[in-house]
Amino acid sequence: MTARAVITGIGVATANGLGVDDFWAATRVGKNAIGPVTRFDASSYPARLAGEITGFEAADHLPSRLLPQTDRMTRLALVAADCAFEDADVRPGDIPEFDMGVVTASTSGGFEFGQNELKKLWSQGSQYVSAYQSFAWFYAVNSGQISIRNGMRGPSGVVVSDHAGGLDAIAQARRQIRKGSKLIFSGGFDASICPWGWVAQIAGGRLSTRTDPERAYLPFDADANGYVPGEGGALLILEDEHTARERGARTLYGEIAGYGATFDPKPGSGREPGLRRAIEVALADAGAAAADVDVVFADGAGTPDLDRAEADAITAVFGPGGVPVTAPKTMIGRLYSGAAPVDVVSAVLAIREGIIPPTTNVECAPAYDIDLVVGQPRPASVRTALVLARGHGGFNSAVVVREVD
Amino acid sequence: MSERTFTIEDLKRILLEGAGAEEGVDLDGDILDTEFEELGYESLALLETGGRIEREYGISLDDDVFTDNRTPRSLVTAINTQLETLVAP
């Protein structure tokens, strides 16, 4: 029998909360955390809003040895990893080191660290560049640092497929559980609200240039005009269900029951985008019918063409208005590799509490035949949730999260 | 150019600035003869430390300075020897 991969610990950091309790207290009621960029002077840039994490002092949580060698995204990820261990009631060392691994996703890498060092290179010379530039801005650095700090030497790696990567990493973690690993850390963190990171995000062409925090990121709204980026993400501890039960795990938040990933056809081909197939593959993998799904956490790109493609895919599988759909990322912005892991966290908390967190600020355009949960949280019995994520360049991924009996 | 010396206090300051301090290691303790590795500094931390010493003191260190000098006392002596040759006529 194939091992079931269950979530037993969570660490999360977003603009509307550090830690599971704060995050969920804000998310369940639809607390907006998008505001003007404060991490640098963005007044001369076309995009000026972000979902920034405030009140995070890395030095309060991490040894000074780690500070000179870490980007902000890595510091957030390391602290989230500590929180996840605590939440799962596992201490590094409880499980043999080769039975624990780390598979995270990354979209940007350590842009802020890289910017500071490149600035030294150009303004002062190569001898001023930190030796830690040799890895601190790498995509794989979060996996590496979590692995080193916690003595996890089992299967590890990084997945890079923009937003979809957050789900692709969780699927890779599940594969490693099925191959016999006892515990795998998964999820993703990105945090590149710095001038260089900002320019790179603007170049993607999909950022909202609005300045009203409540009118800037409006997926599925007739007024959709791009997205607002945020920083943060989530880390999940996945364990084999039997291992988790044997050690008396405190909470089995949910099972990663199904996964599907597809790639879009060549642009201009006129063929259907791949999202519908990703959903169908994930449902089949979970042995679930469309009618079993109680809520869909949408990718929510916030541009009309991508919203249209997502609404069409959801309607094709579930029928018009056939399933509640929500995009709580409207509160915190799009987090790149961190976005989907945060949605998986929301999904398991929705299962636990029986409430669907709302899509904020949005009025669903009549053109979309979806049942978008807007404004207020919606009480609902949630056993099975579907999380969707798409990555720039054609990545589509879907994960089915199911309640553990 | 005035004569400069490199002290253990200078080394501790530069280590802290460039690489921080390992949990459970007290740099203000008796560390002169403790190997850098035991103090929690791996090769990259030492590379960063060497780069900072070079910048601050205007010297160029050999690639093997940290393999030849594995303790703070030995390194401080080696750097001072090099600083003396700088000011020598």
Image (tube, coloured by chain):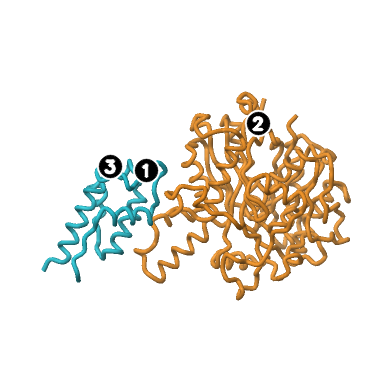
Chain colours: A orange, B cyan
* Label disc, if present, on residue A250 of the rendered structure: 2
Residue B51 horizontal/vertical position (percent): 32, 59
Between A30 and A266, the one nearer to me in the picture = A30
Q: Secondary structure at mark 2?
A: loop
* Label 1 in the same subunit as label 3: yes
* Label disc, if present, on residue A151 of the rendered structure: none
Q: Which residue in the protein does label 3 denote?
A: B34
Q: Is residue B29 left or right of residue A317?
A: left
Residue at the (19%, 57%) spot, across then down: B80
Q: Is residue A256 left or right of residue B10?
A: right
Q: Which residue in the protein does label 1 denote?
A: B25
Task: Inspect the image, locate mark 2, and give the three-letter code of the amino acid beneath it.
Answer: Arg
Residue A294 horizontal/vertical position (percent): 82, 42
Residue B11 horizontal/vertical position (percent): 29, 54
Task: Inspect the image, locate mark 1, and give the three-letter code of the amino acid beneath it.
Answer: Val
On what subunit does the disc labeled 3 rest?
Answer: B
